[in-house]
Structure formats: C-alpha cells, structure tokens
Image: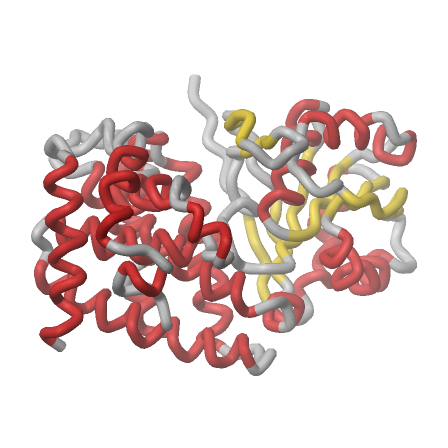
Amino acid sequence: MKTQFYPGYTIGNDAYENIVKICSIYGKKAAVIGGERAIKAAENKIKNAVEGSELQITGFFSFGKEASVENIERLKSIPEVQEADMIFVVGGGKAIDTGKVLAQTTNRVFFTFPTIASTCASCTSLGILYHPDGSLREYTFSTITPVHIFIDSEIIANAPDKYFWAGIGDSMAKYFESSVSSRGNELNHSQGMGVNIASMCNGPFVKYGVKALADCRKNKVSNELEEIILGIIVSTGYVSNLVNIDLNTGLAHAVYNGFTVIPQIEEHGHLHGEIVSYGILVLLAADKQKEEFERIFKFNKEMGFPTKLSELHCSIEDVDKVIEKALKGIDVRHYPYKVTPEMIKEAIIFIEDFQYKR
C-alpha cells in the first residue's frame, strides 16, 4: 500500500488568519520553533491569529544555529514542546528542517511558516541534518509532509532579497534537471506528475522573475512576487515530494557541489542558488539545448546571476577541481548518457566564449 501526502497552502498578507480554522482539528496546543529573526517577524501575527480561540501557543523556541540532532534532542526535552499537539515551524531551510524532523520523529503533525523564499523545505518531507560545526550529517527520508504551509507574502517581501534572488536560481534547476534526468524513462504516476509539475519552474520564473525581484527589493507585495514565491516553495516542493532522488537532481547541482571545493566561493559568500543558476547553463550547454541555453543565458544576465567564471571569483584553472568533485556525487548517476569530465569542461569553455558573441 502506498500513501502520498500533499500539503495545502495559503498565501497572502493575511495568510495567518486561517491558522485556527485549519489547525484546530489537530489539537489545542502548538509549540512554535524557528529562527530568532523569523520568530520576531512572525510572532505577533501568529499570536493575533489565535487570540480568543481555543488554540494555545505553548511557547516560541529558537531552533539553534544548525539543523542538528543535538538541537532536535534539546527541543524534545523542553516541557512546553513535549505537551504540544502540533508543531509550528517558522523560518528558512534549517529552521524548517529542525522542526520538521522533530515532528516526524515524535509522531506529531506540523505546519510550516516560511519567512524567506529560498528553498522548498517548507513543502517537503525530506530533512537535511548537519553536525554542530555545520558539516553535512545526513538526509532524513520520510513520507510525512507538513499539513499546511502558511505563506505570508508581506513577511517574505521584507526579508533580505538575496535569499529570494538565490531561491529563483535554485528552483529553476528543478525543471531542467528533472526533464533531462527522466529522459527515456518509463515514469510511474507520481514521477510523471512530478516531472510535469516541474514545468512550472521554467516559464513562470522567466516571465515574472525580474519584476518579482525588483518588487522584493522594494519590499513590495505584488502578483509577480507571489507567483515566484509559489514557484520556489510549492512547485519545487511538490516535485521533490513526487519524484525519487535521481530525478530530483542533475548536472546543475553536480556543478554546484563541484564549486564547493574552491575556497573563493565561501570567501566571497556566493550562495547555493546563485551557483546552481550557473550550473543550469552548464547543463544546457552540455545537453546541446541551443535555444534554451540562449534564453536562460539572457534571463541570467537580467537577474544578475553569474554567466562567467570570473563572476564566481574563479578561473579556468579551477575547472578541473570543480569537475572532479562534481562527478563524485550522486547527481548524474542516473542520466540519459554518461557525463564525462571533457563534456563539462567543453560546456564551461563554451559559456566563457559565448560572452563575447553577445
């Protein structure tokens, strides 16, 4: 028997007004776990939403600095968390994953309240855990997703725009990677749905992305902003929940992993989604998708994403190290053809040369 869970969602400046209606059927007590800045942004809206109802907030608790087993165990030991019927998780990826895994491992429902739009963590069942020093520990695989996502677009519009910017670059990879990784496969129902939903991570991003980023930088809620928020959080999240890990990744993320061994990347604070956006260009060049490459190259230029190595503080001398690391992971183990070092290097050189033709 297979059961598939799909979270619902509410988006808007008044999204939290639905908390009591949606959550109260699951119990009367909720513990709120999140990042300190995220809690500060959302606390009053959550309190106002439950005021006068039978739904009680047992407390607001910082998740800590890392999504770690140690922080999860610390939170589990807090009496106000223990007595809660449900978990409200507020913040970005690491905060969400901490509360998510806590809820999953204690058999409680959870609801997510993303305060930035940078990943699909608030929609998915997957959790990513780290050691206290920030190094990757493990992926936790579960079928249990949040019951509902409360997306306050006003809070997200007032968050640092760099996360939104990087979120666009990361989320667009979902379409290009899943469409290539699944090529030639006979897909089952959920995988087929996921790959088709992934198309929502292509056209809408190119159509609305530039305007949405400009609005985010003005702290302005607009239709374009909300379309991209939904693309980052919901479209990519649904795909992640529906397809297996091999269809969830591909050459763009392999390239990202490759760049993590280059010291300049961390020294200059280059973001995950920023590097993935460059990885999409490598994927398209390697896959000989000429028209798509030119379309996304133009979009990346308009968005301020990197389109050459120097914009990542790297040079052609770094490429061999990038490729070696890129091919050590699982990202292209399931691909319609063997990805070779020469293929990646040729794609990067093509991108470098393309700069001077436009």
Q: Quadrant of the C terminus?
A: bottom left
The residue located at (75%, 60%) in the rendering is 42
Q: Nearer the viewer, residue 119 or 273?
A: 273
Percent position of residue 192, x then y: 26, 38
Q: Nearer the viewer, residue 4 or 311?
A: 311
The residue located at (15%, 46%) in the rendering is 345
Percent position of residue 289, x then y: 10, 55
Q: Quadrant of the N terminus?
A: top left
The residue located at (11%, 39%) in the rendering is 342
Using the image, determine if residue 326 lies above or below residue 163. above
Q: Is residue 104 visible?
A: yes
Q: Nearer the viewer, residue 22 or 114?
A: 114
Q: Is residue 193 visible?
A: no
Q: Quadrant of residue 128?
A: top right
Q: Quadrant of residue 183?
A: top left
Using the image, determine if residue 171 lies above or below residue 180. below
The structure's colour scheme is: secondary structure
Percent position of residue 8, x then y: 55, 49
The residue located at (56%, 31%) in the rendering is 144
Percent position of residue 165, x then y: 46, 65
60 with respect to 256 (left or right):
right
